[in-house]
Amino acid sequence: MSRTEKFKLEKVSVRLVKDSPLLSDRKITQPEDAIFLLSEILKECDREVLCVINLKADGTPINCSVVSVGGLSSSIAHPREILKSSILSNAANMILMHNHPSGDLTASQEDIMVTDRMAKLCNLVGIPLLDHVIVGNDGSRYFSFKEKELVDFNKRDPVAYSMDMIDLGKVAERSRSARSR
């Protein structure tokens, strides 16, 4: 086996695949607008479904991505899956939305922790998370994290940013040292 065959690296492409559209040019400026867009779909689901609504700067929906389909009372999604469609869609903002098939709109501790983490990460990436909305099984009742002020969607974590800058400084210093040898 030649050296070029041994170290062959596969070339891959990542593409956004468009499905049938959710027909809406209604701008999303409040939780009711997001409910209008997705509640009919989510209320029919017998398991928790987590979606991301990607938005233009003016609040017009670009698309919706189903990130995770879970069980009766939970859905698991990693931040990379949550952010993927937003980045590929060049979204200016995003909204998380999931259903509670039981009809109980109480946000779980995990819901709160994931939302807080995503708000911070989304700000860091430059695609702010505007809200996280939980939809009941009737499609009309909802729980908005922003309205209930459970998470600060506007807060930027200066400690995280300063740690990033310290880490970048260390990497730059190591790179300069390696070049000078």
Image (tube, rainbow, N blue to C red):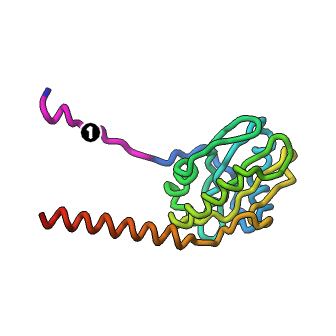
User: What residue sits right under mark 1 in the picture?
Assistant: 9
Q: Residue at x 61, y 54 (%)?
A: 63
Left or right of 179, for residue 139: right
Q: Residue at x 43, y 46 (%)?
A: 14
Q: Residues within 10 Å of mark 1 (few under 14, many from 20)?
A: few
Left or right of 161, for residue 101: right
Q: Main secondary structure of the magenta part?
A: loop
Identify the image quadrant of residue 20: top right
Task: Note whether 154 is above or below 46 in the view shown.
Answer: below
Quarter that holds the C terminus: bottom left
Residue 4 in magenta?
A: yes
Q: Position of residue 101 (x, y in %)?
A: 81, 41
Task: Between residue 63 and residue 163, name the one nearer to us.
Answer: 163
Left or right of 47, for residue 17: left
Task: Note whether 146 is above or below 110 in the view shown.
Answer: below
Q: Which stretch appears magenta?
A: 2-14
Q: Position of residue 46 (x, y in %)?
A: 78, 35
